[in-house]
Amino acid sequence: MGIKVDIKRKLGEFSLDIHFQTESKRIGILGASGCGKSMTLKSIAGIETPDFGMIQMDDKVLFDSANKVDLKPQKRNVGYLFQNYALFPTMTVAKNIAAGLKGSKEEKQKKVQEMIEKFELTGLADRLPGQLSGGQQQRVALARIMAYEPDVILLDEPFSALDVFLKDRLQQELIEMLKDYEGTVIMVSHSRDEIYRFSEELLIMDQGKPVIYGETKEIFAKPVYKEAAKLTGCKNFSRIKRVDVHTAEILDWGITLHTNQEIDEQATWFGYRAHDFVPVWGKRKENCLKINVESEAALPFERNYYLYPEGEENQNKQTICWFLQREKLEKIGEKGMPDYLELTEEGMMFLRG
């Protein structure tokens, strides 16, 4: 059965209307700030109450407006890792971990010791949260959740406050720590890299509604919708005119593309990722864009070129981004700037608005 969420909630001008069902154990929710990601998690945890709908975890109904079921947060057996970890500042590491535990003193102590070892917190049991690093605080917060063996763990932007180096290391640590956890984990983030690394299935949200749900790698490869492509990192978009099943005019770039794939009849946009262009020297091939550099930016590991679209009538329209990673820059150094950029069939995205 897995998890089923089908809820509505109105809060002032904002409306949440979210529905998804999955048996996956690692779920990512991706969306811009303010799109309702955290509200979705808080509704699952019982911190927020939806106006209508149903939330079910395996055979256990957590919320059902029709039958007036609304389990209290402590009855849901859900672990919630907040952005700031929400540790009790005046309690030691050991006491923080023991906070949600039931049972005799001996049973609690045994469990706390087990968690301290599992999460590599040995020697820190008597410290206060303020005396710990960000990574140690995260481990304590996760140890506290895991101690009472929840059915589901909710991770709400767990790395948002950390610098890039620490973030990268803690993401890896978190994946390792959750490896032998049998329950469901739902992670909310606005970072596509975090979500890609962590989740098997992905829900993309926009303004309180689902855009697309499915296998994470599949959505990154074929996002179907413009908003999904944007949230998975696509930088280049153009309006299109679909000429026939294998031909489309890329209106804002001044080129026409011929494809082997069938172009979706409902597509109104074209998307192409900045790293996917293939440089071409010499004669123009099919599905190429003339190089016309407007500006460039040198970054530590790549160079970003910003190109004009083709045709004078397009000069005032949007810029096209071409990002070249360091290993490919050597070829440009040897051969000079290419004459054209080829758009590969695999990279083409015909998108619905």
Image: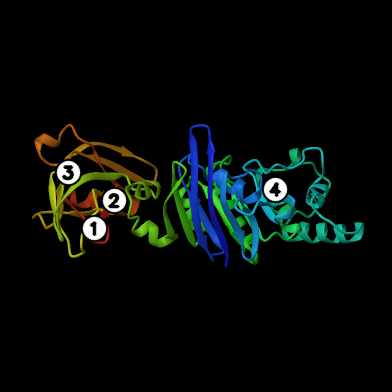
Q: Which of the labelled discs sits on residue 3, or is there none?
A: none
Query: Which mark lies nearer to you, 3 or 4?
Result: 3
Which residue has dot 1 on it?
264
Which residue has dot 4 on it?
136
- Please, what is the three-letter code of the amino acid marked with disc 4? Gln
Which residue has dot 3 on it?
253
Query: Callout 4 environment at 10 Å: few (<14), some (14 to 19), or many (20+)?
Result: some
Q: CA distance from mark 4 to mark 1?
A: 49 Å
Side of 15 relative to 296 (left or right): right
Q: Which of the labelled discs sits on residue 352, or is there none?
A: 2
Side of 250 relative to 1 (left or right): left
Toward the viewer: 350 or 4? Answer: 4
- Count of numbered circles in the view: 4
Query: Callout 2 environment at 10 Å: few (<14), some (14 to 19), or many (20+)?
Result: some
Q: What is the secondary structure assignment of the residue under circle 2?
A: loop
Q: CA distance from mark 1 to mark 2?
A: 8 Å
- Please, what is the three-letter code of the amino acid marked with disc 1? Asp
- Please, what is the three-letter code of the amino acid marked with disc 2? Arg
Q: What is the secondary structure assignment of the residue under circle 1?
A: loop
Please tell me which of labels 1 and 2 falls first in the chain: 1
Please tell me which of labels 3 and 2 falls first in the chain: 3
